[in-house]
């Protein structure tokens, strides 16, 4: 299971289709344009004789000498655009490729509009998700936190989703419109179906108990798998049934709030990494050609190699990259003959590419280091980790108060510390939530608005002890403090900034051992029953686990993705054949996570827009632009 390979496979089939030989145009919608840009470069597409890439609704004069490969989501809007296109064709022939299941009614509408018989073929290529890393995907959906807070009960048609007909439903909030809760839920179902079809899996689906959105999503995906005609999900049954686990972000509100120290996660937290792009236009002392950068594991070898490297190791790696480039530069400066010139010209493209890579990673490293210093992140992060992993209320309260009064600490970071303190000690007998909130509002504590301070209570409503399931802090485990003391005494703590292990990872480690956590997860019909067994206690389980797909309603984080990648590396090293694929509604940093919680509880957004995923929230504090 490889998310990037899954999407690339379909895209290669489109642009290399034998029926599309010769000059052609590639027509996309906003969603499929993003899908392609995440995994494939423009130069690669050009090599396949694609001379024009444009939106489906672009207006221009007819180009009947070109064939058109249309790759779009099967939405009502796109079907209508195709109908208009086919009634007045701008291209000689049309090859239609849909990113998800096409409803029969939509197929009939397209056939009716094709009066000039311009359509050569219609295919379903299931690439309806954004592949970030080989083991990480998401749907780019913002606002799904509200589904965890309150699930919608009905849509315009009178039901949350209509399962009377197969295929993608009609309305998806196109044209940049804000999606309604039923549309967000619908899009999540369609995305998961696409992932399963792309990976050719018919899994057993499990959902975390106590989460309405997780259970409904699991049941809806299962129902749609059963409904699909033409044997879409009738894949060859493996010896070991694949598993899908549907989780809820509210069960772990801590992980998205923590400062990150690994390359990909750190860039997203401090600078914003959206659709593999980094926006540095607001960063000081950055060259104009470096203000918008692409960070992709498919097109950047250095990034692919160090995507999960910690900040210290990354600094050393960037230095080695610079040293290597300087050595290459000196070699190219020594041109004394025609042969030398020819060799230089042959190697120039690679040399130029290396120059761009060096400039990019040096620029990013410099900006990350600046932000760490300006925001005093070393001290802040250490306290975050202690709040997430430790249990010492008096010491933690004293440290939080000190940070709230510290003028060097950014207001948003003060808010995160306050929320982490509230989540950790909400039921503690000596908890001082009122004092913490008063400090946040005080001029010396950041002078936060009432809506920002209200986020402390909103986070408790969303993911507090009464709302969440599971054992977030390990409080229910016996001899917790003793075992932690023994473990740290024997092993030590190698990195105080990386003590935290997301609860998701602890669950996955247990699942990979064949213990399927029946007490925590419910099961819905729709999987492969042949590999299920029943133990002496009568509970259903699977002795062997191979492929596991995890989907987190409300979004995932790069920290969780990094830990999943480590689990996959261990599985590869031991030849266990096990593989984990992690996905979510979106990929959160702390800003986007708090923005969605604010929106769910009708509070003002942190960044003023309410729908973004960026980290470039501009705060002016002590006359410094942070």
Image: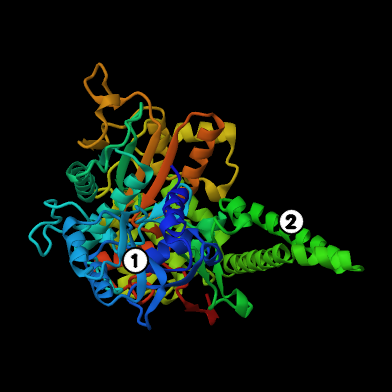
* Quarter the N terminus occupies: top left
Q: Nearer the viewer, residue 421 or 310?
A: 310
Query: Could you tell me residue 484's position as x and y percent?
Result: 48, 35
Closest to the observer, 619 or 123 = 123
Q: Which residue is mark 2?
A: 320
Q: What colour scheme was applied to this rendering of the protein?
A: rainbow
Question: Which residue corresponds to the image point at 27% horizontal and 77% vertical from the top-left?
Answer: 88
Q: How many marks?
A: 2
- Does 201 appear above or below 186? above
- Residue extending farthest to the right is 336
Residue located beneath label 1 in the image:
94
Residue 626 in the image, given as x and y percentages of width and height = 52, 75
Q: Is residue 395 visible?
A: no
How far is mark 1 from mark 2, CA to CA?
50 Å
Category of crowding for the residue at label 2, using alpha-carbon neighbours closer than 10 angstroms: few (below 14), some (14–19), many (at least 20):
few
Identity of the residue furthest to the left in this view: 158
Horizontal and vertical percent position of residue 553: 30, 52
The answer to which of 23 and 82 lies nearer the viewer is 23
Dot 1 crowding, Cα within 10 Å, few <14, some 14–19, many 20+: many
Q: SS of the residue at dot 2?
A: helix
Q: Earlier in the sequence, mark 1 or mark 2?
A: 1
């Amino acid at each position: 299971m490889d998310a990037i390979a899954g999407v690339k496979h379909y895209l290669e089939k489109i642009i290399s289709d034998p029926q599309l030989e010769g000059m052609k145009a590639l027509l996309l919608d906003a969603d499929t344009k993003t899908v392609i840009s995440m995994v494939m470069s423009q130069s690669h597409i050009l090599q396949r004789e694609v001379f024009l890439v444009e939106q489906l609704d672009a207006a221009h004069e007819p180009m009947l000498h070109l064939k058109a490969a249309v790759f779009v989501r099967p939405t009502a809007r796109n079907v209508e655009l195709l109908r208009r296109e086919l009634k007045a064709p701008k291209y000689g022939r049309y090859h239609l490729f849909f990113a998800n299941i096409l409803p029969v009614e939509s197929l009939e509408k397209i056939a009716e509009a094709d009066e000039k018989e311009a359509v050569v073929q219609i295919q379903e290529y299931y690439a309806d998700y954004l592949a970030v890393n080989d083991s990480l995907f998401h749907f780019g959906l913002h606002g799904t936190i509200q589904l965890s807070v309150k699930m919608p009960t009905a849509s315009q048609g009178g039901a949350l989703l209509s399962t009377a007909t197969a295929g993608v439903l009609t309305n998806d909030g196109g044209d940049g419109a804000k999606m309604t809760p039923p549309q967000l839920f619908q899009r999540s179902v369609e995305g998961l179906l696409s992932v399963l079809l792309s990976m050719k899996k018919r899994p057993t689906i499990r959902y975390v108990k106590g989460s309405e959105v997780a259970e409904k999503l699991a049941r809806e995906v299962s129902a749609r798998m059963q409904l699909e005609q033409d044997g879409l999900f009738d894949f060859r049954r493996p010896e070991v049934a694949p598993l899908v686990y549907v989780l809820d972000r509210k069960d772990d509100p801590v992980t998205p709030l923590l400062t990150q120290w690994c390359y990909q996660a750190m860039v997203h937290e401090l600078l914003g990494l959206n659709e593999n792009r980094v926006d540095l236009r607001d960063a000081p002392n950055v060259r104009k050609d470096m203000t918008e950068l692409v960070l992709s594991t498919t097109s950047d070898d250095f990034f692919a190699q160090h995507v999960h490297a910690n900040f210290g190791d990354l600094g050393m790696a960037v230095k080695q990259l610079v040293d290597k480039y300087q050595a290459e530069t000196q070699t190219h400066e020594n041109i004394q003959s025609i042969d030398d010139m020819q060799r230089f010209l042959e190697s120039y493209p690679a040399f130029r590419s290396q120059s761009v890579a060096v400039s990019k990673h040096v620029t990013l490293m410099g900006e990350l280091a600046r932000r760490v210093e300006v925001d005093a992140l070393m001290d802040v992060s250490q306290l975050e980790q202690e709040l997430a992993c430790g249990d010492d209320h008096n010491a933690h309260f004293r440290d939080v108060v000190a940070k709230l009064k510290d003028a060097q600490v950014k207001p948003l970071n003060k808010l995160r510390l306050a929320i982490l303190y509230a989540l950790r000690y909400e039921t503690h007998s000596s908890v001082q939530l009122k004092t913490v909130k008063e400090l946040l509002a005080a001029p010396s504590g950041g002078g936060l608005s009432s809506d920002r301070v209200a986020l402390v209570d909103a986070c408790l409503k969303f993911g507090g002890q009464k709302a969440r399931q599971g054992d977030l802090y390990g409080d229910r485990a016996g001899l917790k403090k003793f075992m932690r003391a023994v473990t740290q005494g024997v092993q030590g703590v190698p990195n105080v900034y990386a003590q935290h292990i997301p609860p998701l990872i602890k669950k996955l480690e247990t699942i990979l051992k064949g213990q399927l956590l029946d007490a925590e997860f419910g099961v819905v019909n729709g999987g492969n029953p042949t590999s299920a067994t029943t133990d002496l206690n009568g509970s259903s389980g699977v002795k062997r686990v191979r492929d596991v797909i995890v989907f987190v309603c409300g979004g995932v984080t790069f920290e969780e993705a990094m830990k999943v990648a480590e689990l996959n590396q261990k599985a590869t090293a031991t030849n266990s054949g096990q593989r984990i694929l992690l996905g979510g509604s979106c990929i959160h940093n702390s800003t986007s996570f708090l923005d969605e919680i604010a929106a769910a509880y009708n509070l003002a957004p942190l960044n003023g827009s309410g729908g973004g995923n960026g980290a470039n929230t501009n705060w002016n504090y002590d006359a410094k632009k942070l």
